Image: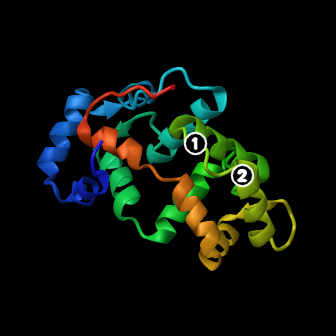
């Protein structure tokens, strides 16, 4: 696949009518369910952690909690991933990591998400346990074993190495490419 970054830079420059047509082609009902999202992205047959991660992504993009991603939520999600400010992205990451919704993230939650992401992207350049250990070593200054939203955001911003790892691990470019190209493509299992 050629130079994807050039096309991604122009994604949001396309007019809203084009985006609406693309959305409606993928989901004629005007709403995307979790099952449809997995189908659009070619994410069937995942392990339990990866499946849990995709569910969590869906529920963080389903801003009104109605069980569907509508057009406004779809555009907001793509816009956040492509053009969002770092604070917005860090808040979204935190919400994604906080699987039990208690307002804090712990080591198990982070490891589960990072492992799941690797299962989906097949990118094993970074060892999840090492990333989690580094994050907690540098950010969890109180040694509580949990991070609040404020600790997470400030810690990530204060440590460029952690920010770089988060950006690499959370790169959703492959997902956006599938959405933009409008084709279903199964994960390469080789």
Q: Secondary structure at mark 1?
A: helix
Mark 2 vs 1: CB contact within 8 A: no
Question: In the drawing, does residue 136 fall left or right of residue 66?
Answer: right
Q: Residue at x 54, y 20 (%)?
A: 45
Question: In the drawing, does residue 4 fall left or right of residue 161?
Answer: left
- In the image, residue 123 above or below residue 187: below
Q: Secondary structure at mark 2?
A: loop
Q: Quadrant of the N terminus?
A: top left
Viewer-side label of 2, 1: 1
Q: Position of residue 139 (x, y in %)?
A: 74, 70
Residue receiving disc 1:
117
Q: Residue at x 40, y 42 (%)?
A: 175
Residue receiving disc 2:
102
Q: Residue at x 65, y 65 (%)?
A: 149
- Front-most of residues 147 and 2: 2
Q: Categorize mark 1 by other alpha carbons within 10 Å: few (<14), some (14-19), many (20+).
A: many
- Front-most of residues 1 and 26: 1
Q: Quadrant of residue 84?
A: bottom left
């Amino acid at each position: 696949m050629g130079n994807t970054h050039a096309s991604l830079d122009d994604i949001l420059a396309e007019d809203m009518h084009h985006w609406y047509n693309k959305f409606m082609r993928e989901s004629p009902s005007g709403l995307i369910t979790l099952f449809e999202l997995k189908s659009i992205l070619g994410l069937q047959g995942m392990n339990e952690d990866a499946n849990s991660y995709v569910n969590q992504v869906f529920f963080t993009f389903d801003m009104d909690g109605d069980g569907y991603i509508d057009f406004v939520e779809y555009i907001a999600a793509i816009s956040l991933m492509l053009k969002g400010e770092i604070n917005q992205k860090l808040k979204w990451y935190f919400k994604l990591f906080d699987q039990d919704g208690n307002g804090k993230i712990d080591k198990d939650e982070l490891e589960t998400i990072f492992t799941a992401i690797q299962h989906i992207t097949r990118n094993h350049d970074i060892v999840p346990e090492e990333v989690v250990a580094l994050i907690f070593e540098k950010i969890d200054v109180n040694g509580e074993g949990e991070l609040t939203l404020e600790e997470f955001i400030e810690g990530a911003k204060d440590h460029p190495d952690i920010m770089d790892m988060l950006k690499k691990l959370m790169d959703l470019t492959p997902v956006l490419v599938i959405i933009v190209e409008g084709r279903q493509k199964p994960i390469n299992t080789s």
